[in-house]
Image: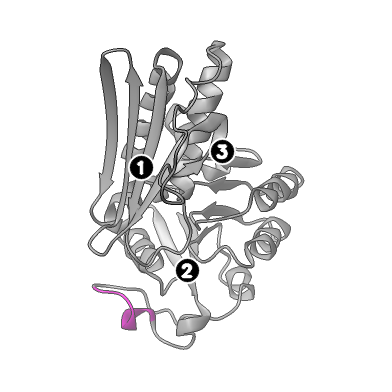
């Protein structure tokens, strides 16, 4: 039985994670941390059955609960300190927080390389999103251009999404590894509205961000070549779509030394 603590337990993803862990026969939810709901019973914030746990406000309660794995769905602010705590207290970490700075990730690599604990950081825990990235890696070396459109709910504070940036990085890496070089240059010479061509990602890949009520998490990657296009799209309509990936990471993080970035690596092991 894997003992699991959830940090950010009162948030949308945190509540969904708590419920998913509670339903898994091989996992035990032993700690829920969220300063915004400290003192409440977990049953007060979850729909359906829940263990008799009070939500706490500090990371120290994870140690008291003897958590084997910590799932962190919080905010990017303070993430460096939280990762240092997990590594320093030998707790495996599964992190889905969005907008983490690259410098924080690189520092976490050092921390977990020196720790008996491991870490999985994924911009997106949907298995379909991991497959989208894999398909894009196959297409990248043989197509002439690509643009990414990511669409999220109107409460998302960062843009572009970590998923879109990760996809662009993997596309660029796939082209470099294949010796395909850069994509065709952008022919645009006149821009009448700032940002009309989106943000400029790795290897000049254009990334466009959409924020609207009614959306959850969606990504569309459009490749182009002479006389043809290829569109690869993934849609998450409910946060439950992320739970198979979260549970996979919880179960596999102990087998992945150091820090693993992206869910795709777990699909190969």
Q: Residues within 10 Å of mark 3 (few under 14, many from 20)?
A: few
Residue 168: x %, y % from top left:
48, 34
User: Between residues 64 and 252, which one lies in front from this camera angle?
Assistant: 252
Residue 128: x %, y % from top left:
31, 38
Classify residue 84 by image quadrant: bottom right
User: What residue sits right under mark 2 in the picture?
Assistant: 30
Q: Secondary structure under badge 1? A: strand
User: What residue sits right under mark 3 in the picture?
Assistant: 255
Q: Residue furthest bottom?
A: 39
Q: Earlier in the sequence, mark 2 or mark 1?
A: 2
> How far apart, in angstroms, are the residues tagged by discs 1 and 3?
34 Å
User: Between residues 119 and 187, which one lies in front from this camera angle?
Assistant: 187
Q: Is residue 143 magenta?
A: no
Q: Secondary structure under badge 2? A: strand
Q: Which numbered mark, 2 or 1, is in the foreground of this view?
A: 1
> How far apart, in angstroms, are the residues tagged by discs 2 and 1?
39 Å
User: Between residues 205 and 266, which one lies in front from this camera angle?
Assistant: 205
Q: Earlier in the sequence, mark 1 or mark 3?
A: 1
Q: Residues within 10 Å of mark 2 (few under 14, many from 20)?
A: many
Image: 165 above or below 153: above
Instruction: Check if mark 2's residue and mark 3's residue have beta carbons within 8 Å.
Output: no
Residue sitting at 39 percent across and 84 percent down? 41
User: What residue sits right under mark 1 in the picture?
Assistant: 149
Q: Is residue 46 magenta?
A: yes
- Count of number-bearing discs: 3
Residue sitting at 28 percent across and 55 percent down? 240
Residue 146: x %, y % from top left:
40, 28
Judge from the rendering whether residue 211 lies leftward or rightward of residue 73; answer left or right. left
Q: Which numbered mark, 1 or 3, is in the foreground of this view?
A: 1
Q: Earlier in the sequence, mark 2 or mark 3?
A: 2
Image: 248 above or below 172: below
Magenta span covers which residues? 42-47
């Amino acid at each position: 039985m894997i003992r699991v603590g959830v940090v950010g337990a009162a948030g949308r993803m945190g509540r969904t994670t708590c419920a998913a862990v509670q339903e898994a026969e091989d996992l035990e939810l032993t700690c829920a941390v969220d300063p915004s709901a400290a003192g409440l019973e977990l049953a007060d914030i979850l729909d359906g059955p829940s263990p008799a746990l009070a939500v706490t406000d500090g990371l120290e309660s994870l140690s008291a609960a003897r958590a084997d794995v910590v799932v962190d769905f919080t905010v990017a602010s303070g993430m460096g300190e939280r990762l240092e705590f997990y590594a320093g207290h030998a707790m495996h970490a599964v992190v889905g927080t969005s907008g983490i700075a690259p410098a924080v990730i690189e520092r976490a690599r050092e921390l977990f390389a020196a720790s008996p604990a491991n870490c999985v950081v994924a911009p997106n825990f949907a298995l379909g999103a991991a497959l989208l990235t894999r398909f894009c890696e196959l297409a990248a070396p043989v197509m002439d251009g690509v643009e990414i459109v990511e669409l999220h709910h109107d409460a998302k504070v960062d843009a572009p999404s970590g998923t879109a940036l990760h996809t662009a990085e993997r596309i660029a890496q796939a082209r470099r590894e294949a010796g395909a070089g850069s994509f065709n240059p952008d022919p645009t010479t006149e821009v009448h509205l700032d940002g009309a061509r989106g943000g400029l990602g790795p290897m000049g890949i254009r990334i466009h961000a959409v924020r609207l009520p009614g959306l959850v998490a969606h990504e569309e990657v459009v490749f182009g070549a002479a006389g043809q296009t290829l569109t690869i799209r993934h849609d998450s309509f409910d946060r439950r779509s992320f739970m198979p990936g979260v549970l996979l990471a919880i179960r596999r993080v102990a087998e992945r030394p150091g820090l693993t970035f992206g869910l795709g690596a777990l699909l190969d092991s």
